[in-house]
Image (spheres, grey):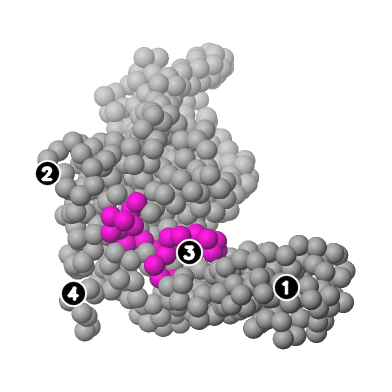
Amino acid sequence: MPMNPASPPLIHARGLTKRFGAFTAVDAVDFDVAPGEAFGFLGPNGAGKTSTMKMIGCTSPASGGTLTVLGMDPETQGPEIRGRLGVVPQQDTLDEELTVRENLLIYGRYFGLSRAECGRRADELLEFAQLSERGSSRVEPLSGGMKRRLTIARSLINEPDVMLLDEPTTGLDPQARHLLWDRLYRLKQRGVTLVLTTHYMDEAEQLCDRLVVMDKAKIVAEGSPRSLIEQYSTREVAEMRFAPGVQDTLDGQFNGLADRVEHLPDRVLLYAEDGEAVAVAAHDRGLRPETVLVRRSTLEDVFLRLTGRSLVD
Amino acid sequence: MTAPDAAGTPGLGQTPGVGQTRGAAVRAGAPSGLPRPGTPSGIAAAARVFEHRAWQYRRAFRGSLFGSFVNPALFLMAMGLGLGGYVNAQSPAAFGGVTYLHFLAPGLLAGSVMQQAIFEATFPVMEGLLWRRTFHAMYATPLGPQAIAMGTLAWITFRLALVASAFTLVSALFGATESPLAILGIPAAVLTGLAFAAWMGAYMATQRTPDKFAAIFRWAIMPLFLFSGTFFPVASLPASIQPIIWLSPLWHGVELTRGAALGTLLDDPFRALIHVAVLVILTVAGAILFVRNIRRKLAP
């Protein structure tokens, strides 16, 4: 395989496919992840993100295509690859019977680390996850955010080359999410390669250097958050909400106001370079929305443009 | 950082920069096909799974061990001595010249180890695959389905050995053992239990709920427990039924434990060997299925 020795991809996929019987969960996707990159899979539930992650994590065999992880073949070198990954699964897999610290210790043992080394790393990781005071407490009563932080700490015990994070903040309250993002951001700053899936566009924007948008088992776009927004959306959006029932009567009234108009069930989105100007023009036309919000375009808008649907239903 | 040569867990430590550069970022630049030193495989990998169970067991250890002694003591007292007193008085020769306590104790040994095995192969497997998903956590590391299944069976072996040893000790204290060969009843009972545990584990690994457990216990395990020569000789059953009993793995186990307790095990070594062979074959076949079913569940 010809690879650039300066920076060979850590993960390399071509035509990667996963089928379950007649159902195709991942349909011939291509992507590369470079060392030190924060790479995201953005898409709604059921887009094939988790299946892709499981193939990268060598816990689910590919049905077709090629995949190399850390230069190795998941089919034959799964244990060696897994030994160098740090996995944060979507669903917690902590042992609630053990204490916080014991969870880290035993996990280190799975990687073949000595007990002394496990202890040393566990203490550092508890510090990093801001769980030092909870080390001897059982896992069961911890909050969702604490459990997630413990799972992230656990995934670092083998000093992984790549971290795989599947929906790392799903189900957490905003404060816990921000705390978690802060920790992940620190890892990124230190050059740890992050691969994550999310259906939160703000998470993707905050953490990812580059991402692919997945929908219905396929990759529909790829780029940095900024380049995706530039390519698939306008600079600004004017969101207008109308009184119930009114929106359905407004067909055609938005023509020519903006570069593009999206009609969502509860609001109308008008895409333009200058959202404020659009709002004024709409007012001049006699449109009277109950609320108008002018904002920057986000990845949510990119997704809407690409698929005609919202990310979070 | 505690040690000057610390490799630096990525993202850790309070002082950025110094000592932090090895670790993920640097290694990341040089993917290599070489496994990392220390990546456990084979028996070492299964040993890690065993170790996990040992960590869990540390908290339950005292209560569980206490029960391992109390249960056989209660049973031998009530049935061996209490009920046995009447049985012995009615028909002194019914049990081949030994007291009912002597007859019952090895049967109960194999029977209760079987029951323990069924429990040990049900709930921890459900927990690992579905409830706490600890097997999934293991599978995100170098450990694979084989290590997980074999480590689980190794732990069950250990647990059954504890139960069988406690039982044998209590039997000896009750004067229910006739021979030093009784010590062989421990591996015989453990092997009996494993023959059940491997199949039960393999079956439960295919389940989404433990609902079938109650039915299996009621319709398979209890009848085997009652009719495998545990409480009364198989010879007292109708002749037409007796060959069916030979299909019971527990019967093979009881023949071994009873032979050990009464010191007659080696009188017919070929017969003993056949019992062992049946149980070994069952255990190996069940273990293969167990590994396969765990793999199917973990790596869809």
Q: How far apart, in angstroms, are the residues tagged by discs 4 and 3? A: 27 Å
In primary-sequence order, the first of circles 4 and 3 is 4
Regarding residue A6, the answer to whether it shows in the image is yes
- Amino acid carrying label 1: it is Val
The chain containing the residue under callout 2 comes to B
Q: Please tell me whether residue B36 belongs to the stretch shown in magenta.
A: no
Label 2 SS: loop
Label 3 SS: helix
Q: Residues within 10 Å of mark 4 (few under 14, many from 20)?
A: few
Q: Which residue is mark 4?
A: A6
Which mark is drawn over residue B5?
2
The chain containing the residue under callout 4 comes to A
Q: How far apart, in angstroms, are the residues tagged by discs 3 and 1? A: 29 Å
Q: Residue at x 29, y 64 (%)?
A: A36
Q: Which residue is mark 1?
A: A280
Which of B240 and B159 lies nearest the eye of the viewer?
A: B159
Q: Which residue is mark 3?
A: A205
Q: Which residues are magenta?
A: A186-211
